[in-house]
Amino acid sequence: MEIFVYHTPDQVPDLSKKARKGGLQLEMPACAIVIDVLRATTTIATALQSGAEAIQVFDDIDELFRVSQHWPAEQRLLAGERGGEKLDDFDLGNSPLECTPVRVSGKRLFMSTTNGTRALERVRTVPLLLTAALTNRAAVVRYLLEQQPRTVWIVAAGWRGGFSLEDTICAGAIASALRVERGSDCAGDDESIAAMALFDQWQTRLPQLLRYAHHGRGLAALGCDWDLDYCARIDSVNVVPVQMEPGVLKAVRYDASGHTLN
């Protein structure tokens, strides 16, 4: 298994052209994983764990409104934010703590966020597309070990086009766990090695890390401290969001013993 880490969506090669990295011709990866710890991919995993039917993601808000109108009103929720704050006329913002079973069970969330949904748009044509966060790291690793993709691109959503410390550390958490399981059969680029080193430095201090990171400080200023605590709970959610059709993520669920439930 070969792992490539991209710190922002803009770093992801345009595969419609002859993309190269390290002197090598790049081909479509077997799998891509999008990470937006604060908070889109944490919220996606939590909503699916709480029984949401699916999460349908959009970069464009007008398209979200247009498509969502074709879904029964009692079975849909609009979830979105810009700059960390809930969008007007939306049912939910981008807080995982809003996604309780009472609120989301059986419903489809139509979602648009500042960073995460843009990153998903960038790699939506990859054959196997997942989302990951610190909360569902172990479930994602388990799924990858089952699926055995030859190449994996881990794409950090970043923050407004720039590097995001928490997303890169989550990439390192995934790569580190795969390295433990696969040993020498798991190779990574320099970015993945750097991400693993960052995770090793911070793995026992994830709540502090999220408050130290630039994006985390911004969310704290908006009063989202409980979100930060929740997003730091590594391996606490047993769901893998998998793209089942373009832009639509559904849950692969595991029980406490690591067996799939669907």
Image: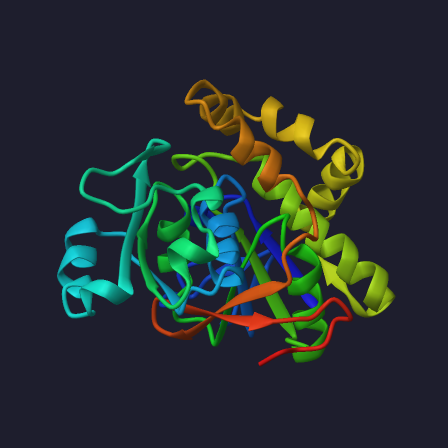
> Which residue is nearer to you in this view: 33 or 98?
98
Closest to the observer: 187 or 146?
146
Q: Residue at x 14, y 64 (%)?
A: 69
Q: Position of residue 195 (x, y in %)?
A: 69, 43
What sort of colour scheme is used for the picture? Answer: rainbow
Above/below status of 89 relative to 57: above
Quarter that holds the N terminus: bottom right
Residue 178: quarter of image:
bottom right
Tell me the residue at 25%/38% (across/down): 87
> In this figure, what is the number of numbered marks?
0
Above or below, 241 against 197 in this view is below
Q: Quadrant of the C terminus?
A: bottom right
Q: Residue shown at 20%/50% (left/top)?
A: 61
User: x and y percent of residue 5 in the render?
Assistant: 60, 52
Judge whether residue 122 can be spotted in this image.
no
Residue 45, how many percent across, how many down? 52, 57
Q: In the picture, residue 84 is in which quadrant?
A: top left
Residue ranking furthest to the top:
221
Q: Is residue 243 above or below residue 91?
A: below
**Could you tell me which residue is drawn at 56 percent across and 73 percent down?**
252
> Is residue 247 in view?
yes
Toward the front, the furthest residue is 102
Q: Does residue 212 appear to the left or right of 67 in the view shown?
A: right
x and y, in percent, of residue 38 in the image: 50, 39
Q: Is residue 235 left or right of residue 30?
A: right
